[in-house]
């Protein structure tokens, strides 16, 4: 029998038209378009691209944005359900429960027609930001803030979170964050979601499966880990001792290395640029300087120790962006999901369109 690799490393499981990764050259494409070219679009346009397979024209984008805005609100019964549970600091538990609740109120939940799935996809993309913001405010006993229809997807989320209209740069940063989080081929949450979809389970159930997988600290939870690490270091002067201590103890340093990328993650480069601009706008470069110091320490240490550098991944500078946007660490994974839901939906639709139940075998020992 051919030697197997743990974690299915290197195994090609299926064909897809949704995204492409070249881990050697550091390339990421959605539907054949490089992420660098997509980062300046609106999240609505990228969401449409992922789900529908093409960049929308002006009329298509206007209609898609209109439908998203019409479906941003959540009803009173959903809000009451959110208030009834104590989710502590793990916002993703609340988001998972809220999506189950949303499915319960959707008359098309168990309808599997293309039209029904299209309607459900609109509701999911539109309501994720509203639910996350409402959960956060409910955790402090505060009332949810109604969405504003004249704000972009990212800007509206920041507004619902704090009640303040974000600056132009803050709104741009949130849009880019959602775009960069939207899709990444067969990552663990997407693969688990495609397995669920392959059984012909409904779209809500598949997305919930993705949420459960995203929660883990080795996947979506890594971003929160970086934010916690930055707090733990406390000062730039402590950075070197902290990083070298981690290496000596053979402990993982959150935000570095990637299963697929052997060079710099292209998303990390974009996040670093956003983080720098936010630091300058805030007139406080502490978080950015601290992160850059850690990056340089690890880069040189790995060259000296292993003869090759290690690079920050998508989570490292995205955590710095969240610091400047005053986003609490406990929301990091849920905000990741706000962006990723479009990619998840695209994979569900692709699985439904040419389905065979995903059922690998195990080697008994």
Image (cartoon, grey):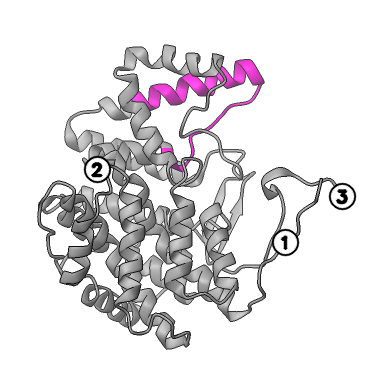
Element class at badge 3: loop
**Left/right of residue 129 with respect to residue 341 in the rendered view:** left
Residue where numbered disc 2 is placed = 327
Q: Residue 287 versus residue 273: which sits nearer the camera?
A: 287
Q: Which mark is residue 166?
A: none
Query: Which residue is painted at 39% across and 21% down in the image?
Result: 293
Q: Residue 145 versus residue 148: which sits nearer the camera?
A: 145
* Position in image of residue 180 (x %, y %): 41, 53
* Position in image of residue 241 (x %, y %): 43, 11
Is disc 3 surrounded by few (<14), some (14 to 19) or many (20+) residues within 10 Å?
A: few
Element class at badge 1: loop
Residue where numbered disc 3 is placed = 2
Vertical order, 28 against 118 (above or below): above
Task: Measure the C-alpha gap from mark 1 to mark 3.
Answer: 15 Å
Is disc 2 surrounded by few (<14), some (14 to 19) or many (20+) residues within 10 Å?
A: some
**Left/right of residue 304 with respect to residue 8 in the rendered view:** left
Q: Residue 71 versus residue 310: which sits nearer the camera?
A: 71
Is disc 1 surrounded by few (<14), some (14 to 19) or many (20+) residues within 10 Å?
A: few
Outermost residue on the right side: it is 1
* Position in image of residue 103 (x %, y %): 35, 73
The residues colored magenta run: 289-315
* Position in image of residue 73 (x %, y %): 20, 70
Vertical order, 237 against 71 (above or below): above
Tell which circle, 1 or 2, labels the residue nearer the N-terminal end. Answer: 2
Foreground mark, 1 or 2, reads 1
Q: Is residue 329 visible?
A: yes
The number of numbered discs placed on residues in the rendered structure image is 3
Query: Which residue is painted at 18% across and 72% down in the image?
Result: 75
């Amino acid at each position: 029998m051919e030697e197997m690799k743990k974690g299915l490393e290197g195994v090609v499981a299926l064909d897809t038209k949704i995204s492409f990764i070249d881990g050697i050259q550091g390339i990421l494409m959605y539907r054949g378009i490089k992420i660098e070219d997509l980062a300046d679009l609106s999240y609505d346009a990228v969401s449409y691209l992922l789900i529908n397979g093409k960049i929308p024209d002006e009329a298509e984008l206007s209609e898609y944005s209109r439908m998203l805005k019409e479906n941003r609100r959540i009803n009173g019964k959903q809000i009451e359900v959110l208030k009834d549970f104590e989710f502590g600091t793990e916002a993703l538990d609340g988001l998972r429960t809220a999506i189950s609740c949303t499915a319960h109120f959707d008359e098309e939940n168990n309808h599997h027609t293309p039209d029904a799935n299209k309607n459900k996809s609109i509701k999911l993309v539109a309501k994720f930001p509203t639910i996350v913001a409402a959960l956060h405010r409910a955790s402090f006993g505060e009332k949810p803030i109604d969405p504003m229809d004249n704000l972009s997807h990212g800007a509206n989320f920041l507004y619902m979170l704090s009640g303040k209209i974000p600056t132009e740069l803050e709104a741009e940063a949130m849009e880019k964050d959602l775009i960069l989080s939207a899709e990444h081929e067969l990552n663990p949450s997407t693969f688990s979601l495609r397995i669920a979809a392959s059984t012909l389970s409904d779209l809500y159930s598949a997305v919930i499966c993705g949420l459960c997988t995203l929660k883990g600290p080795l996947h979506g939870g890594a971003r929160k880990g970086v934010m916690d690490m930055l707090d733990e270091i406390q000062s730039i002067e402590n950075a070197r001792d902290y990083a070298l201590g981690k290496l000596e103890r053979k402990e993982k340093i959150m935000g570095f290395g990637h299963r697929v990328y052997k060079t710099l993650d292209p998303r990390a480069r974009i996040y670093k640029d956003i983080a720098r601009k936010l630091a300058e706008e805030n007139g406080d470069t502490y978080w950015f300087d601290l992160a850059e110091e850690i990056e340089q320490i690890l880069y040189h240490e790995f060259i000296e120790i292993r003869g090759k550098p290690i690079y920050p991944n998508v989570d490292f500078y995205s955590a710095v962006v969240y610091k400047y946007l005053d986003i609490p660490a406990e929301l990091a994974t849920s905000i990741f999901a706000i962006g990723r839901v479009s990619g998840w939906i695209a994979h569900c639709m692709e699985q439904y369109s040419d389905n065979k139940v995903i059922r690998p075998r195990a080697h008994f020992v």
